[in-house]
Structure formats: C-alpha cells, structure tokens
Amino acid sequence: MDFIYQDPYPILKDDTQYKKLTSDFVQLEQLGNREILTVDPKGLELLAQEAMNDVSFMLRNSHLQKLNNILNDPEATDNDRFVAYNLLQNAVVAVEGQLPSCQDTGTAIVMAKKGENVYTGADDAEWLSKGIFNTYQNKNLRYSQIVPISMFEEKNSGSNLPAQIDIYAKKGASYEFLFLAKGGGSANKTFLYQQTKSLLNDKSMEIFIRQKIKDLGTSACPPYHLALVIGGTSAEANLAAVKKASAGYFDNLPTSGNMSGQAFRDLEWEKKVLEFCQESSIGAQFGGKYFAHDVRVIRLPRHAASCPVGLGVSCSADRNIKGKITKDGIFLEQLETNPKQFLPATPPHLEAPVEVDLNRTMADILKELSQYPIKTRLKLNGTLIVARDIAHAKIKELLDAGKPMPDYFKNHPIYYAGPAKTPDGMPSGSFGPTTAGRMDVYVEEFQKAGGSMIMLAKGNRTKQVMDACKTYGGFYLGSIGGPAAILAQDNILKVEVVDFEELGMEAVRKITVKDFPAFIITDDKGNDFFENL
C-alpha cells in the first residue's frame, strides 16, 4: 500500500471577514532561501488584548441573525420570542463596551497554528497571556479563575489568568488564531461518551442523541450552537474537535470522508439532530422550538475498539473570534458593531407577567407564589440575596458547626449569581444568573433550616430539589441565562456586600431589583416545568 498523508482537518476555505489592527510589529526577512515573517511579540499582546475585548462585548453577525429569525418564525413559542428579544436587547447594551454580554466573562482560551517560517524570539504564550491580562484588568470583566494553593485550599487569581493556550505547528509564514471566552455554564455541558461500534446505525444513534439532548438541559443558556463529534483517534482529540466545531471553526470542512481519514461534516445528521432538538420542546430555556440555532456533526476516524462521542455547545454568549498575522499585518475577525439592526421596531406581544413584591415577609411571598402554576412569568421587585458555590459551602460549615442559618438566607429569595466589575457611575456590573444545579446538594438541608425557600437561577434541577420544595414549601424560579448586561442596566438598582467580602465575586450580596424577569419552574407542590416536557 502506498503512503498517503493529508491534513486530518482540511478546512477548505476561510470566509471570515477580518479587520486590520495594524501593519506594525511584522516584517519579512531573508534567511538563506527562506522568507521569514518576524513578529514582534508585542503584536501577540495587542492581538490577544483586542480579541478578548471584542469577544466580551460583541457577537457575530450570523449569531444575531439567528436570534432575529426566531422572532420572525410563526412556529416559535412566546417563550422562544421572549428569550430571543431579551438576548438581542442585551447585545445592544453590551456593544457599548461597558457591560459585557455575560457576567461570566469566561476562561480565556487561545488555539493557534504557527507557521514554520514565523519567528517571534519569545515565549508566545507569555505574550498572549499579557494581552489577555490587560483586557481583564482594564475592562469591566470578571475574574473567574480559581487557583489551588493546596489540595483543598483555593484562591481567586485576581487576574483571570491562567489562560488555556495551545499552539500547533503548520507550514508557511502565517500565524492563525481562534480566541474563546468560555463560561463555566457551557464548559460544564461538554460531555464525552465512550461508545462502541454498536452505536453506528440509524436507530441506535437516534435513541442515543435524543437522550443526550435532554441531558444537556438549559443551564448553559440556549439557544445553542450544538456540536456532536463521532469518533476520534483519542478522547482528547474528540473533545478538542467538539470545542472547535461549536465555535464554527470547522464549518468549511469537507462533507464526505476518504481513505486518508479526513474529518468531515455530515449534513444529513446535522439536519436530523436539529429536528431532534426542535422536537424536544425544551426551547430557548422555557419551552418551545429553539433549543438550538444550528448543529454541527463531525465524523472522525477511530480505533477499532473505541468510539468516543463528544457533545458540547456554544451558548447564547457565543464568544468566539478568529485572528491572524501575515506579512500584511495583524488582523482580527470583524464582529457586529450594530446589533440594534436586528431588533424589531416593536417587542413581541406577550401576556402580562405577575408582579411580585419581595419586600414582604417570606411567608407572604410564598403564599402569593403558591397561587400560580409552573410556567407563570413574573416580574420581581425588591430585595434579593446573591450567593454562589463558595458562599453556600461556608453556610453549610456554619450549620455543621451547630450555628444558625444567617437571617438573610431566611428572609429573602436567593439569587445564584456572581457579578462582573461595576462600571463607573452604575449600580452594578453585568449580573446574570449562574447554573442552579451546582447548588442542588444544599437545598434540602438549607430549606429544613428555614433558608433558600425561594431560589432564582438558570437551568433545570434534580429531583431532590423538587422533593425538598414539596416537603418544605419552597420555590425555584428560572431567570433567563445570557442577558446579563441588560439586567445590570435596567433591572438592578443597588448592590451591597453583606457577608464574606474576601470572596470577591463569590461574596454574599444584597441587591435591589426592579421588574426583574423570572418564571416559576418548581413549585411548592413538587411540580417542575422541565419534568413535564
């Protein structure tokens, strides 16, 4: 047999629209018979800095168009349209450059391909990290990276570093980049399934995918750009392909395989999986058609004894941006600077929500909520307590030590969230909900102690939460995942730290809200919206 080699991921074209940042920092030099592209590492710093800035406040034109399509689709539900309209409003606020589109401004990830004839004379990852550092220091972004001091002691790095930087070698004299800001919600919804040859038929594949779509749930803020990768020379190769596919990086792969084992998109299965998503009725977070905007199904070669399957998403904060350095300069993908063009002249018609005054006793608020069924849309006005993972763990430590539950956890609804930095002159930075499921393990114990009687967050929850709410008379309210900027601008009036100030964005806060949107997801009778789908 003859030796055959080809690029395993043959991207056939790059139709990205780029803007030129500068012609500085690059020059061509002759080294023998080679033409070398010499790049001053300050150019890497500039590119990373601008990429992380743009991707935190702007979105791709194609992503915004898909949100607009939901508003114009007669098959979309009112809940689909409500979410899509809010996400477009959020984009209009975020593009001003003060409030990032999502409060979880993510782990900074860089995937690069460096040509053999590119010379920097430096540790490229260090200079890319410096650019990332600059943006997170100078903009109203959140520091989400927790570093281990010992096995169990952790601290916030205070810079959002370290970043994940992977640099590959390629032929030529150009340097290509994919930058991502990956939030915890969508990162946590990346799954690897070690399957076998028995999966590779129509019936088994359909059963498998339909089940895994339900497992994805809504906690990563749909509508999603969903990626499904079948095969891979290793589990690591599979999951790397999932991330790149969800970012649109593999959109221009071939659409059929060959004996060299090239990766390809399966357009037929992309259409099928999108139909499965629509038929799930999960919708854009609260029921409907738009669980996913689109689907990428990538087929890879595999070991005969192994069939890894990867599933992942890019969420409603679709923060992916490409860059490149060539002899002509430093370039960055052009994101949309005018998202307002995608907003309709008038908002979609919706039934009026129920207004709930939170500045009453907990008993009175619970009594009012008990009158309404799940799926009821609410407007919340008054006081919320904000607490996330570490604060919950610390309160559990108090209970374990025989100390009482803090009164603020008993007297007010608990909002699972962690804000970005606050812009000058504003009451709050971007401040959307975090994933509710991470706090599920605390609910029964906390409600038994009289706390967490009303919880507000995003995504579906486990049966233990439903059971606890039924036993103790509690409620879980769903908030739209994604529009963190518009919540900060329009709905949050005041923010103050009330406990654990040393935890930074994980500190317990008291916030005052106005017309804060929410839905009843789990009620005091044990009913749950997602269980009924």
Image (cartoon, helix red, strand yellow):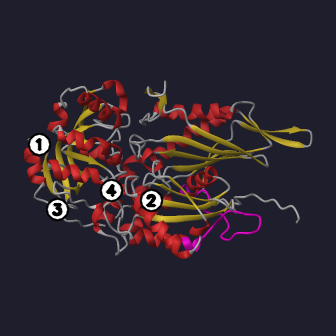
Amino acid type for the residue under numbered disc 3: Pro
Expressed as whole percent of the image width and height from the top left, the position of residue 44 reads: 65, 37
Amino acid type for the residue under numbered disc 2: Tyr
Is tag 3's residue or tag 4's residue first in the polypeptide sequence?
4
The numbered dot on residue 362 is 1
State how far apart marks 3 and 4 are (Cα).
23 Å
Q: Is residue 90 left or right of residue 328?
A: left
Expressed as whole percent of the image width and height from the top left, the position of residue 15 reads: 63, 60
State how far apart marks 2 and 1 are (Cα).
36 Å
Label 3: which residue? 373
Label 4: which residue? 86
Q: Which residues are magenta?
A: 246-269
State how far apart marks 1 and 3 are (Cα).
19 Å
Amino acid type for the residue under numbered disc 1: Met
Label 2: which residue? 224
Q: Is residue 444 left or right of residue 278?
A: left
Q: Residues within 10 Å of mark 2 (few under 14, many from 20)?
A: many
